[in-house]
Amino acid sequence: MTILITGSTGTIGSQILAQLAGKGVEVHALSREPERARFPDGVTPVKGDLMDVEVMRTALARVSTLFLLNAVTPDEVTQALITLNLAREAGIERIVYFSVFCSDEFTNVPHFAGKYAVERMIERFELPATILRPNYFMHNDLRLREAIAGHGVYPMPIGGVGISMIDIRDIAEIAVLHLLRRELASGPLPRETINLAGPEVLTGEAVADIWAKVLNRPVHYAGDDLDGFEQQLRTFTPSWMAYDMRLMLARFQQDGLAASPGDVDRLTALLGRSMRSYHDFALETAKQWQGAKN
């Protein structure tokens, strides 16, 4: 009985590996360059790429539970569908798929629509899977240090409707709970979909106010300029990705990405505790930034 983690060196995959350590299960971590990765003790590195069919056949033949996370890439859907088909061939009946919040509604946003296509395959073929739909990661804002702490600006144009940001550690903990539940079950469990969202609905102005409080200095929201956002993003990401992110932010501004009370109640019950708030995240981050300066 073995769990295979894809996306093992990324933001979520690395958190999952850390939280699986010491849980008494065998864990394999798929990576293109495992020799450069720093995995927890006890994790078995597996060199491979989701687009390499023969390598994936071999990797999947040795596992009982699959955690499938695909990065946002032009071939994301192809990667996911090939992997799920190979998992079916291997007889894997325990799957956790990492999708995105409102994947079925944001149909004009490429990486949302792509993940929903994968969800449809899971449903059509009745694969025994937990589909996790995470909201915007609080930790995405770590990359905004210069703007927030240096210039007193919250630059992410998330709008004024509100989104339910979630801490990546809460995401990973819930993912681990479901991986272990499926791995340790005597047989396949029913398919389910779980929305992963934080405990509060946050606007751009609200997030700026939180940073102002924890940094004890003025921080203002930069506004809803999507042209500027896309142009800035294109300086360090491909143009297709910058446009994909622009489309996502446009939907945030138009519709928001807010959880229902039922979502938060369900996650609180799963965790057995309150979820981390954005204020908690910002306060912790501000202390780290201050420590890095000293």
Image: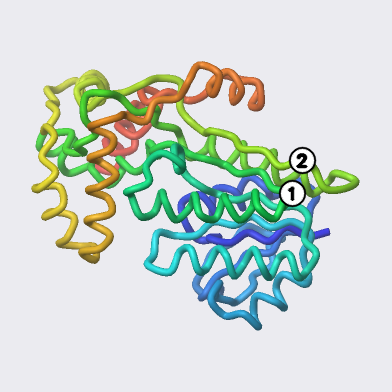
Q: Amino acid at mark 1?
A: Pro
* Above/below status of 246 relative to 197: below
Q: Quadrant of residue 83?
A: bottom right
Q: Residue at x 33, y 49 (%)?
A: 109
Are dots 2 and 1 in contact, CB under 8 Å?
yes
Q: Locate the C terminus and report the quarter of the image it occupies.
A: top left
Secondary structure category for the residue under label 2: loop
The reply, left or right, for residue 54 in relation to residue 250 is right
Give the x, y percent position of residue 234.
Answer: 17, 60
Which label number is shown at residue 190? 2
The reply, left or right, for residue 64 in relation to residue 293 is right
Give the x, y percent position of residue 198.
Answer: 45, 26
Q: Residue at x 26, y 23 (%)?
A: 161
Residue annotated with mark 1 = 128
Q: Nearer the viewer, residue 144 or 268?
A: 268
Q: Nearer the viewer, residue 255 or 53?
A: 255
Q: Residue at x 54, y 38 (%)?
A: 171
Q: Nearer the viewer, residue 184 or 36?
A: 184
Which label number is shown at residue 292? none
Q: Earlier in the sequence, mark 2 or mark 1?
A: 1
Give the x, y percent position of residue 186.
Answer: 90, 46
